[in-house]
Structure formats: structure tokens, C-alpha cells
Image (cartoon, rainbow, N blue to C red):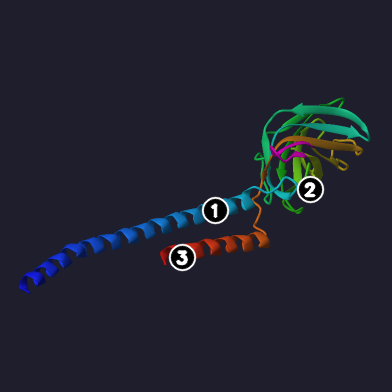
Amino acid sequence: MIIQHDISTLTKVETEPERLLAGKVAINMKHQALRQVCSGMMTATVALLSALWICPTSADALTVSELDFTSGSIALKNGSATIAARNFTTSGQIVMEQYQPLPDIIAPISINVPLLGTHTFSLFTSGPNPFPSGNTSGSTITADLTSLLAKLTGGLIPVGGVTTNIGGNAVGSFNSLTNAFTGLTWSHGLSGVPGLPSNLTVQFTLNGTAQLAAVPLPGAALLFGSGLAGLLLRRAHKVVS
């Protein structure tokens, strides 16, 4: 009886570490599986949110946050006749939803007007008209630039220059694959500007790249994302249990 008792005790001592080891292995396997599920859940959720937030479809109407132009033109017109024009390749930017002081938009632009001399346009935005704003829709880009002003100097303009509004509602072509815009054009009459004929109109055209604002998630996308997260959490619960 003593020998049997000793053998039984010895056997129990030998198998206890094995059971402990097996339990630890099972726990580690569950933890590893849980980490894999959580990692997959995070990856899927981030991918979904990124795709819906940052990558809207090309047909969506998008908000412009900045116009980065690299070239353009300025023309002075008398009715339909162009009396002076100049192309420029100076880079500049118009930031939406805020006003920009001199010379933040672009360096001064000069144009030679026959019989009137060289005139310089120094651009800035200010009230009382609203902040600049812009949108794209398909292959079209529009911008409210009615707060665009210029300080005009040169020619017959009084010494020290005059400030006048030269803004307008601009329309151009938009490439949704590259965010490039071309022919973003608007016109504004120069009636009442001292030193200039009352029938003149200035026309601006810009080409460049539009910076687009991130698109908020629609309600349906949020519901889909929450449903996906719920499924992954249930899967994680099954792994743990």
C-alpha cells in the first residue's frame, strides 16, 4: 500500500506541469488569435474610413480649399475687343474661406496698355464680399472670387494708386484624376476707376491645381462601418470563449 501510494503520488507530480503547460499554450494561442482578429479589425476599419473620407468618386461635388495656379493671363477689353493682354507664368495661390493681404496671392502683375502706359495690378482679398470659395462637379470647377481686389498703379492713375474690386464668379475646366484646372476665367468692369476709360473690363484666366477638402462620411457609410466593427468584435469574442 505504501509503494502504491508513493507511485500514485509520483505520477501526480509528473503530470501536473504538463497540464499547466497545456493550459498556458491554449491561453497563448487564444491571445495570438485575438491579436490577429483585432489587427484585422483595425486594418479593415482604417481602410474603410480612409477610402470613404479621402477618396470620393470623380463624379462627386467637392469643396475646393485652395487654388494653386502656375500660369494665367490678364486682358483689358473694350466691349468684345481686347485692347491689351498679357500671359504670365508666376505662381500664386488663392486660399478659400479667408482673406489674404498683399502680396500673399501673387507678385504684382503689369500690363502695357496702348496710349495709357503700363499698369500694375497688386491682388488681395478683403470684405465686404464673402471669403473666396470654390467647388468642383465632374469636369467643371467654379469659384466665388467676388472679394478679390487690386491696387492699381501706373499710367494715368493718380499717384499712390487706387484700390478697386476686380473679382467675379469664375468658371473653368477640371480634371478629377489630377485635380488640375484650366481656363478658370472671370471678368469685372473697371467703370469709375480714375485714369481709366469707363468702358473697360478686366478679364483674368488661371491654370493650376486645386486642393480639395476632405469629404465627411455619409450616414450610410457610418452605419456600414459600425456594422463591420460589430461583426469583427463578435468574431473576437468567439475566439476568446
Disc 1 designates what residue?
A: 44
Front-most of 210 and 53? 53
**Residue positioned 89% across, 30% down in the render:** 82
The nearer-to-camera label among 1 and 2 is 1
Q: What's the amino acid at mark 2? A: Thr
Q: Which mark is residue 36?
A: none
Q: Quadrant of the N terminus?
A: bottom left
Image quarter of residue 3: bottom left
Disc 2 designates what residue?
A: 146
The magenta stretch is 174-183
Q: Is residue 210 above or below residue 23?
A: above
Front-most of 193 and 8? 8
Q: Residue furthest bottom?
A: 1
Disc 3 designates what residue?
A: 238
**Residue positioned 83% across, 36% down in the render:** 203
Q: Quadrant of the C terminus?
A: bottom left
Q: Is residue 143 magenta?
A: no
Q: Is any atom of residue 132 visible in this view? A: no
**Residue positioned 59% across, 63% down in the render:** 227
Image quarter of residue 72: top right
For marks 2 and 3, the one nearer the N-term is 2
For marks 1 and 2, the one nearer the N-term is 1
Left or right position of 218 against 46: right
- Asked whether disc 2 touches disc 3, contact meaning CB atoms under 8 Å apart, the reply is no
Q: Dot 1: few (<14), some (14–19), or many (≥20) neighbours within 10 Å? A: some
Q: Is residue 178 magenta?
A: yes
